[in-house]
Image (tube, helix red, strand yellow):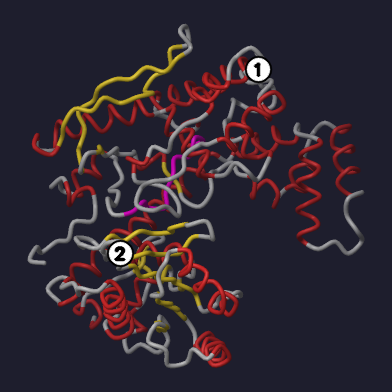
Amino acid sequence: MTSKTAKIYFTDFFEVSPEVLKDYGAFNVSLINDLPLFVDPFLLFDSNKPEYHDLHEEIIRYVKFLRDISTDASINKGLLGNWFRFPEVGQNWLGFSRTGNKGSGLGNKFAETLHRNLHRVFKNFGDETITQGSHLEKLCLMADGVGRDHLSDFTTNLIKPYLLEYTQEFARKHIDASLRREFAIEKVRFDYAARRWKGAKYELPTIGNDFVLLSPRDILTKDEAWINRGDLIDHFQDIYQAVPDEQLRAQVNDYFLRRLSEDAKEEEIREAAASTIEQFPQVLDYYIRHKEKTGDEAHKVSGLKVRDTEEQFITQIRALVDEKLLGTPFYDEASDGYEESLRRLHFLKSVIEDQDGYRIFYHKGKPIQREADLQIMYLLTWCATTYDVNREVNNGRGPVDFKVSNGSRDKTLIEFKLASNSKLKQNLKHQVGVYEAANDTAKSIKAILYFADTEFRRVQTILTELGLTGRRDVVLIDACASNKPSASNVRDVGQGELALETEQDSTE
């Protein structure tokens, strides 16, 4: 590659200054792979921007429509599918554990869960007496089947007109006409009188044959929505014990305690809490009221998470690519997918172990030990490749982390594992072989990252027991901070930001 900057992010592809995009309020997404952020509807509800309040009201209006029509047995399945099911809005390039930007969207399971719970959970929509308002997230509190990705997909679909106009305005002001064009978009606005979705046309940034959507930074978060089931279960006892209705509090307490043994462990307590919530959904309103009262914290936490994501997946990846990889043989591709994958992995191993690249795996001085984050970092280094690099390919026997291919006969699978993974031995023994058979290839590579000497010794023991010691297709990557010459220079700067010092910084 001869370019001084690899094309990874929105601003790279559309030749816009990152500062201009940030001043506009939009997040600089990667157009190589989704980044792990999503729209939290609570940030719309609790915002001081009138336009966000209007968006939240439109979401609630549509949910009330679904609730009201779901009792009509005469409505055919085709109409129900059109009203209840939505595709993922992949053009915003946000999400979790997806190949590129293509997710599954809101399919039958979500539609069935929504249909089943509407009457119980949303029967008092618009007439709340305990909470300040109505909340879509309430649906996610009832069952494990509806999570943050479903919540975000549903929200993003219903605020799509705003995102389209938001992106169109930026594109017309800041993006060259040659990099944008008009698109006819389906399911933009819902006509309640005609009970059908209507489309519209927008002038948008284009990549390939598709468009790109921008998202405002102040409606995004990471990990979990402010109102979420995990938080509800974790704090269930505090929540129901604070219920002012004495009779309800006594009933909930009795039902909950009768499901616990004397020496109940955490799992049993969580199961009892879930069962009690199912029996007394009124408790949900008291939980939501508590979250409403602490709304200021939601914006602070989400703001930090967005900045942390930028630091981890944009600032530091950009530094890794531009300062460590460009101008090196890294992007000179081999003619064989296996050799190319292995070569890139060894080059990254060298950068991590010998050139301070290990710092990219640390946040607030602690190692990032989430496989999904490490996989995203790896994938972002495949920019401008002629190979087809797909993440989480699933051929019916579970998803493999990466498949690198160049035609139907040249396929290589790559699995990233953390040395701390409790199932590491089991996965090395069985998992990869299953994946190879499912993908019709005998070529695979196992990359194992370790962050401590104890983890390294554990991996060595496992490899010895499995007869994998010294294998070319098993690559160990040392991400320990303690054994690096410049480890003492890893420090925090600002709130939630990780230092990535230059050589000059390191000597100060």
Query: Looking at this view, is 248 or 118 the one in front?
Result: 118
Query: Looking at this view, is 327 or 361 the one in front?
Result: 327
**How many numbered discs, if any?**
2
- Secondary structure, mark 2, is strand
Residue 257, compared with residue 142, is above or below; it is below
Residue range highlighted in magenta: 33-42
**Residue visible at 60% across and 38% down?**
109
Image quarter hosting the N terminus: bottom left
Tag of residue 405: 2
Q: What amino acid is found at the position of numbered circle 2 in the picture?
A: Ser
Residue 386, compared with residue 151, is above or below; it is below
Image quarter hosting the C terminus: bottom left
Tag of residue 127: 1
**Residue 345, percent across and down?**
32, 77
Query: Residue 393 lies in what quarter of the image?
Result: bottom left
Query: Looking at this view, is 217 or 351 the one in front?
Result: 351
Mark 1 nearby-residue class (10 Å; few <14, some 14–19, many ≥20): few
**Residue 79, percent across and down?**
52, 19
Question: Disc 1 or 2, which lies upstream in sequence?
Answer: 1
Q: Main secondary structure of the magenta part?
A: loop
Residue 103, compared with residue 336, is above or below; it is above
Q: What amino acid is found at the position of numbered circle 1 in the picture?
A: Asp
Query: Looking at this view, is 414 or 90 the one in front?
Result: 414
- On the picture, is 368 further left or further right than 294? left
Residue 34 located within the stretch drawn in magenta? yes
Query: Residue 53 lies in what quarter of the image?
Result: top left
- Give the Cα distance between marks 1 and 2: 55 Å
Q: Nearer the viewer, mark 1 or mark 2?
A: 2
**Residue 34, percent across and down?**
36, 51
Residue 497, compared with residue 133, is above or below; it is below
